[in-house]
């Protein structure tokens, strides 16, 4: 059987967290650990909270490895930031050379996705991936082709 391992100090911290939390999901995780400490079986705890046995085992393992800090949910960073420039602004930007922008510190004459990412970060405080840049250009119908000698 899998049970949460709690010493006296951790037990006090667990009880204090249960009493003071206002977040329902966090409370549920804490109560799972509390019931596990009281030697309630995983399947019984899962039935009480309508969770899968694997979820309960995951909570217990997370707690055993890192106590309360290990039990905290690791949520993502949220939705990726988007490029706020219009089609006209991006087209005008592509008409200029990257070497004209002092903060880019480059002698390049043509844009690439790495330079565009650096430009957006330096001048617009937008940190986006190169794939997001490519998707935005595709969405706006701006061709992102290799420069061709004419």
Image: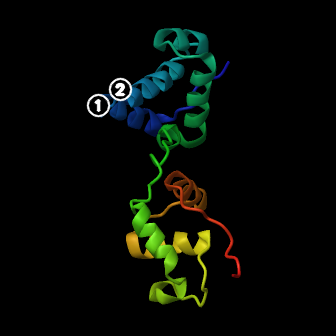
Q: Secondary structure at mark 2?
A: helix
Q: Residue at x 53, y 88 (%)?
A: 99
* Quadrant showing the C terminus: bottom right
Residue annotated with mark 1: 22
- Label 2 Cα crowd, 10 Å radius (few <14 / some 14-19 / many 20+): few
Q: Mark 2 — residue? A: 24
Relative to 148, does residue 40 appear above or below in the rendering?
above
Q: Are marks 1 and 2 in contact (CB under 8 Å)?
A: no
Residue 2 figure quarter: top right
> Residue sitting at 44 percent across and 74 percent down?
92
Q: Is residue 104 above or below residue 127?
A: below
Q: Name the image quarter holding the N terminus.
A: top right
On screen, residue 126 versus residue 149, left or right, reads: left
Mark 1–mark 2 Cα distance, whole angstroms, equals 6 Å
Q: Nearer the viewer, residue 14 or 78?
A: 78
User: Left or right: 2 with respect to 98?
Assistant: right
Question: Helix or strand or loop: what does disc 1 sit on?
Answer: loop
- Does residue 124 appear left or right of residue 119 in this picture? left
Q: Residues within 10 Å of mark 1 (few under 14, many from 20)?
A: few
Residue 77 appears at what percent x and percent y? 47, 49
- Location of residue 96 with respect to 73 vertically, above or below: below
């Amino acid at each position: 059987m899998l049970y949460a391992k709690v010493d006296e100090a951790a037990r006090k911290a667990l009880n204090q967290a249960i009493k003071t939390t206002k977040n329902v999901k966090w409370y549920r995780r804490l109560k799972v650990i509390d019931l596990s400490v009281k030697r309630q079986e995983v399947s019984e705890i899962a039935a009480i909270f309508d969770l899968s046995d694997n979820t309960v085992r995951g909570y217990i393992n997370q707690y055993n490895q890192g106590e309360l800090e290990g039990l905290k949910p690791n949520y993502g960073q949220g939705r990726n930031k988007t490029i706020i420039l219009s089609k006209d602004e991006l087209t005008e930007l592509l008409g200029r050379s990257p070497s004209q922008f002092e903060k880019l510190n480059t002698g390049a004459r043509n844009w690439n996705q790495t330079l565009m990412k650096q430009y957006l970060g330096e001048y617009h405080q937008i940190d986006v991936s190169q794939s997001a840049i490519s998707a935005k250009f595709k969405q706006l119908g701006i061709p992102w082709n290799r420069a061709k000698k004419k």
